[in-house]
């Protein structure tokens, strides 16, 4: 299984990549054998842990920011097989067995995204492409050899690419409103730190908060200590 | 998702294409192109022309004998452009086409006197240079770009007018006009040159 991160520009640093990598390999819990390969798709590989294989960001067409995440779905992207993507503001709390756990919750024939359950209750009636997307791409799972996944990129990289970039604020809205079928991870696996109020799932996402802030970092550190007391 | 055949965002995109800043910058180009052309006939091709505002404003400035085509890689631009500008009594001569200004540049510029492209910030620099290298000598080329980096589809902004000139100028026999227009969030640059 591949685990891949994307780092473009200066919002996140190689320290953030390494921090996430370490949170995965050093996470506490039951010590199942892990056999992931780690990748980082980036425009600046300097400082990234040598155990993470870097893939240079392709420049044709040049994409900015989060739009680079779509490129991972290209047929010729240098990955094969089951793949998990994580945003750099994700924290893995508890070690899990990739095969036992992931295979039980993921339909590898479909793109799996994070359920933004918290958006479902308060959506006003407004532009559909702005607010009615109730999934997010903090974490993604797909089979890199699946032609249906390749179509997500091919449809984007078409004569309408510029229009899509104007129309959609990010890839979540592009994926949903262009009609691609997605599944969602179970909420027991992934929770939002902000919306689940200090969630206790194995994986925590930090959307809608400043990940670099002291409050987030100190929560992670205290959580690590608490987990070590439980598992060690 | 929206119904497959109904995309209301197009309405907003069309409205955006007609905003005041676009009118200003495209009027500016129309005025300066007319200054350097000053003939009663000719053929103009506006590439990457979106829904056709630039073609319309050129048509407003130019004598009625001048033929104007607006093309875009997005096929919807042709359909919508025809509705907005293609059937008006005084703009009947604007023709709309679906063309890729990079891949189709030779076809686009064949028989054309003036090639216009105000979307240079949307086209990678290497492709802009490739495109310019394939335009025959003797044609007038009018280009606009900007320094508005904060837009995801702007993949080839220029830091300044000098930066824009630096990679475009080598493709021209001589520069006929160069200038800069300030807007609240960005500056727009224009070069008109002879191939």
Image (cartoon, rainbow, N blue to C red):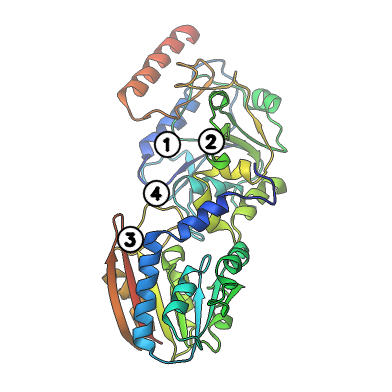
Q: Nearer the viewer, mark 3 or mark 1?
A: 3
The residue drawn where x is 71% and y is 46% is: A148
Of the two numbered discs 4 and 1 on the same chain, state the one appearing first in sequence.
1
Location of residue A169 with respect to A203 vertically, above or below? below
Residue B164 showing in the rendered view: yes
Q: Residue at x 53, y 36 (%)?
A: A131
| Secondary element at tag 4 | loop
Q: Are marks 4 and 3 on the same chain?
A: no
**Subunit of label 3:** B
Discs 1/2, front = 2
Q: Which residue is mark 3?
A: B147
Q: Nearer the viewer, residue B1 or A4?
A: B1
- Disc 3 to disc 2: CB gap under 8 Å: no
Percent from the top left, x then y, of residue A5?
Answer: 49, 39
- Residue at the top extreme, as displayed: A230
Mark-to-mark CA distance, 4 and 1: 11 Å
**Numbered-mark total:** 4
Q: Chain of mark 2?
A: A
Per the image, the residue denoted by label 2 is: A131
Give the spatial CA distance, label 1 vs label 2. 30 Å
Mark in the foreground, 2 or 4: 2
The residue where tag 1 is placed is: A17
Q: Say whether residue A76 is visible.
A: no
- Residue under numbered circle 4: A44
Where on the picture, by quarter, is residue A121? top right
Write down the chain letter for disc 1: A
Q: Are marks 3 and 1 in contact (CB under 8 Å)?
A: no
Q: Do marks 4 and 1 share a chain? A: yes
């Amino acid at each position: 299984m591949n685990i891949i991160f994307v780092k473009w520009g200066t919002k996140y640093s190689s320290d953030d990549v390494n921090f996430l990598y370490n949170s995965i390999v050093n996470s506490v819990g039951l010590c199942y054998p892990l056999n992931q390969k780690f990748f980082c798709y980036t425009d600046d590989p300097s400082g990234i842990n040598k155990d993470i294989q870097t893939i240079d960001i392709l420049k044709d067409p040049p994409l900015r920011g989060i739009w680079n995440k779509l490129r991972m779905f290209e047929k010729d992207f240098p990955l094969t097989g089951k793949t998990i993507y994580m945003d750099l503001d994700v924290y893995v709390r508890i070690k899990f067995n990739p095969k036992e756990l992931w295979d039980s919750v993921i339909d590898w024939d479909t793109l799996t995204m994070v359920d933004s359950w918290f958006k479902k209750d308060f959506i006003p009636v407004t532009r559909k492409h702005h607010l009615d997307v109730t999934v997010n791409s903090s974490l993604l799972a797909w089979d890199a050899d699946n032609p249906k996944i390749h179509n997500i990129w091919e449809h984007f990289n078409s004569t309408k690419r510029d229009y899509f970039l104007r129309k959609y604020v990010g890839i979540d809205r592009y994926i949903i409103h262009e009609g691609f079928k997605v599944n969602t991870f179970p909420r027991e696996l992934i929770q939002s730190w902000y919306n689940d109020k200090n969630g206790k799932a194995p994986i925590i996402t930090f959307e809608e908060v400043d990940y670099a802030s002291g409050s987030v970092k100190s929560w992670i550190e205290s959580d690590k200590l608490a987990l070590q007391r439980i598992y060690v | 998702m929206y119904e497959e055949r109904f995309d209301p965002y197009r309405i907003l995109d069309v409205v955006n294409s007609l905003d005041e800043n676009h009118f200003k910058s495209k009027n500016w180009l129309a005025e300066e192109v007319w200054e350097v052309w000053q003939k009663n006939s000719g053929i103009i091709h506006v590439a990457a022309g979106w829904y056709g505002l630039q073609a319309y404003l050129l048509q407003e400035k130019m004598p009625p004998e001048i033929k104007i085509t607006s093309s875009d890689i997005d096929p919807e631009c042709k359909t919508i452009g025809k509705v907005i500008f293609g059937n008006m009594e005084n703009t009947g001569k604007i023709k709309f086409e679906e063309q890729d200004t990079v891949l189709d540049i030779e076809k686009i510029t064949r028989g054309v006197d003036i090639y216009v492209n105000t979307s240079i910030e949307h086209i990678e620099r290497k492709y802009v240079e490739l495109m310019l290298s394939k335009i025959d000598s003797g044609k007038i080329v009018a280009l606009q770009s900007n320094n508005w980096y904060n837009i995801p589809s702007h993949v080839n902004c220029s830091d300044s007018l000098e930066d824009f000139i630096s990679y475009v100028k080598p493709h021209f026999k001589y520069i006929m006009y160069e200038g800069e227009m300030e807007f609240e969030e960005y500056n727009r640059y224009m070069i008109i040159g002879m191939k």
